[in-house]
Image: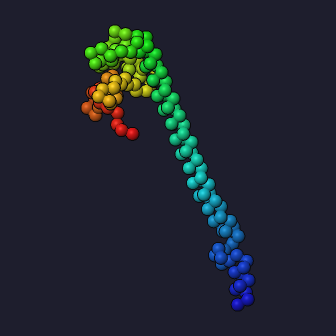
């Protein structure tokens, strides 16, 4: 009985007569699994943060470039319920949004507020049938 308790105290919980090398191998494997999980979590977080930064930057660049192009047309105003810049009508005119997409690399949309909602009047976004997604509202957040 005394021998059993002595063995119990010396660490035979891990498998009785296992060799030290086997115990080290199991401990190393467990450490590797934990490290893999931790590294995986860190990589996913860093990748997500990088993508959010990149897409946020592209969206900001797209907005700035589209604003630059519309400023070249003139002051924004409404004429007969249609958005214009100078004398240039923006509704269903895709030149500026297409230029923005081609030069910046991200989609571009011009909105007009109609009946209290933002409505796309010119966009590079397409519907499921391939048509421009004009006269549509963005999905709610």
Q: Is there any visible trace of residue 93 in the rendered image?
A: no
Q: Is residue 68 left or right of residue 110?
A: right
Quadrant in the picture for the N terminus:
bottom right
Quadrant in the picture for the C terminus:
top left
Question: Vertical placement of 128 versus 22: above or below?
Answer: above
Residue in the picture at 66% in, 68% down: 22
Number of numbered discs overlaid on the protein picture: 0
Question: Vertical placement of 54 versus 16: above or below?
Answer: above
User: Which of the 4 image quadrants contains residue 2?
Assistant: bottom right
Query: How is colour applied across the structure in the image?
Result: rainbow
Q: Point out the residue furthest to the front here.
A: 116
* Percent of width and height locating residue 124: 35, 25
Q: Point out the residue furthest to the top here.
A: 87
Q: Nearer the viewer, residue 80 or 98?
A: 80
Residue in the picture at 44% in, 18% down: 67
Q: Is there any visible trace of residue 27 in the rendered image?
A: yes
* Percent of width and height locating residue 50: 54, 37
Q: Nearer the viewer, residue 2 or 136?
A: 136
Residue in the picture at 34% in, 9% down: 87
Question: Vertical placement of 20 versus 3: above or below?
Answer: above
User: Which of the 4 image quadrants contains residue 93?
Assistant: top left
* Percent of width and height locating residue 46: 57, 42
Q: Nearer the viewer, residue 100 or 115?
A: 115
Q: Is residue 138 left or right of residue 57?
A: left
Question: Vertical placement of 13 versus 72: above or below?
Answer: below
Q: Nearer the viewer, residue 3 or 94?
A: 94
User: Which of the 4 image quadrants contains residue 78?
Assistant: top left
């Amino acid at each position: 009985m005394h021998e059993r308790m002595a063995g119990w105290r010396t660490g035979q919980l891990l498998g009785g007569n296992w060799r030290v090398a086997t115990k080290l191998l199991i401990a190393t494997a467990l450490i590797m699994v934990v490290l893999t999980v931790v590294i995986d979590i860190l990589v996913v977080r860093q990748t997500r943060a990088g993508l959010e930064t990149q897409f946020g930057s592209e969206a900001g660049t797209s907005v700035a470039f589209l604003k630059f192009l519309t400023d070249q047309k003139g002051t924004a105003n409404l004429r007969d319920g249609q958005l214009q810049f100078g004398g240039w009508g923006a509704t269903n005119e895709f030149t500026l949004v297409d230029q923005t997409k081609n030069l910046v690399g991200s989609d571009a949309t011009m909105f007009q507020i109609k009946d209290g909602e933002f409505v796309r009047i010119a966009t590079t976004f397409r519907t499921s049938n391939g048509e421009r997604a004009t006269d549509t509202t963005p999905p709610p957040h």
